[in-house]
Image (cartoon, rainbow, N blue to C red):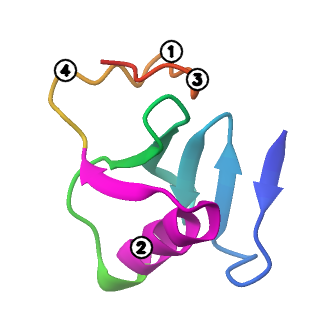
Amino acid sequence: MIYSLEKYKQNLRIWNGQIYSYNKKVAVVSEKDATVYVLGWWSKTTTRHINYVANLIGYKTKPAPENLNIENWNPYSSGI
């Protein structure tokens, strides 16, 4: 299921624990450790999108570690 969020409904989507801003995967959500892992450095607007999702679900944000497996991302495991 793809979620479109009200505040940024045209440019922000969540699908299978992955956050997309402007159709680019920018972060992943880990239910296991209540963290949004940010996949690189992003513009001010995209960073605002990521923080919006994290605040909405009450999770912290962290840079994604290099060994994060995002190819087969499972939001219920840490992926590390």
Quadrant including the C terminus? top left
In three-dimensional space, the C-alpha distance between marks 4 and 3, rounded to whole angstroms, equals: 17 Å
Q: Residue 75 placed where, x, y %? A: 57, 28
Mark before the other along the chain sequence, 3 or 2: 2
In depth, the one of 4 and 80 nearer the eye is: 80
- What SS does tag 3 mark? loop
The residue that label 3 is drawn on is 76
Residue 8 colored magenta?
no
Q: Are marks 1 and 2 in contact (CB under 8 Å)?
A: no
- What SS does tag 4 mark? loop
Q: Residue 11 placed where, x, y %? A: 64, 72
The residue that label 2 is drawn on is 46
Q: Residues within 10 Å of mark 2 (few under 14, many from 20)?
A: some
In three-dimensional space, the C-alpha distance between marks 1 and 4, rounded to whole angstroms, equals: 13 Å
| Residue occupying image coordinates x 48% and y 43% | 34
Magenta stretch in the rendered image = 46-63
Mark before the other along the chain sequence, 1 or 2: 2
Relative placement, left or right, of 67 versus 35 is left
The residue that label 4 is drawn on is 67
Name which residue type carries label 2.
Thr
- What SS does tag 1 mark? loop
Picture quarter containing residue 12? bottom right
